[in-house]
Amino acid sequence: MGLKCKPVIDYTLCNGCMACVSLCPYKAFFSDVDAHAKIDYSKCKMCGVCIILCPYGAIDCQWVPTSSQCQSGLKQSS
Ligand code: SF4
Ligand code: SF4
């Protein structure tokens, strides 16, 4: 069982620059109605790019087991 890095935004550090919205290769970030950056975890591939590139160091890594990602129904029964 491996671990993957789930990005979590620390809003005490985030200044709302929205760089992450354009930087995420999977378009998982969006600007919410409250003008905060949010992560759509159904799109996030846990690539870690945003954690490295956030100019304010506002995105932390939360380690999660990869097996928990494999449970959600990607297969459709036929
Ligand atoms: S790049 Fe970092 S500081 Fe800018 S909106 Fe995203 S999380 Fe916040
Ligand atoms: S970890 Fe990768 S896919 Fe997930 S939000 Fe950050 S840049 Fe996007």
Image (spheres, rainbow, N blue to C red):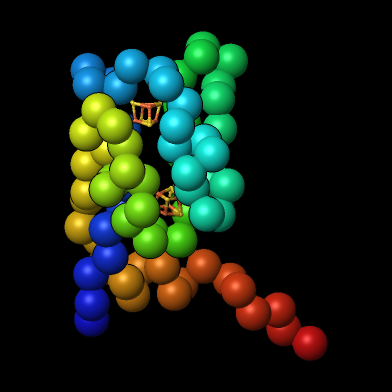
Judge by depth and name the residue closer to the eye, 10 or 17: 17
The picture quadrant for ligand 1 comes to top left
Q: Position of residue 24 (x, y in %)?
A: 48, 48
On screen, residue 32 above or below 29: above
The residue sitting at the bottom extreme is 78
Q: Position of residue 76 (x, y in %)?
A: 71, 78
Q: Position of residue 17 (x, y in %)?
A: 42, 21
On screen, residue 14 above or below 25: above
- The quadrant the N terminus occupies is bottom left
Is 6 on the left-hand or right-hand side of 31? Answer: left
Judge by depth and name the residue closer to the eye, 7 or 69: 7
- Residue 47 can be seen in this image: yes
Q: Residue at x 32, y 71 (%)?
A: 66
Q: Residue at x 22, y 17 (%)?
A: 12
The residue sitting at the top extreme is 34
Q: Residue at x 28, y 65 (%)?
A: 4
Quadrant hosting residue 55: top left
- Residue 40 can be seen in this image: no
Is 47 on the left-hand or right-hand side of 18? Answer: left
Is 35 on the left-hand or right-hand side of 62? Answer: right
Is 32 on the left-hand or right-hand side of 57? Answer: right
- The quadrant the C terminus occupies is bottom right
Quadrant hosting residue 2: bottom left
The number of numbered discs placed on residues in the rendered structure image is 0
Q: Position of residue 30 (x, y in %)?
A: 56, 32
On screen, residue 65 above or below 41: below
The residue sitting at the right extreme is 78
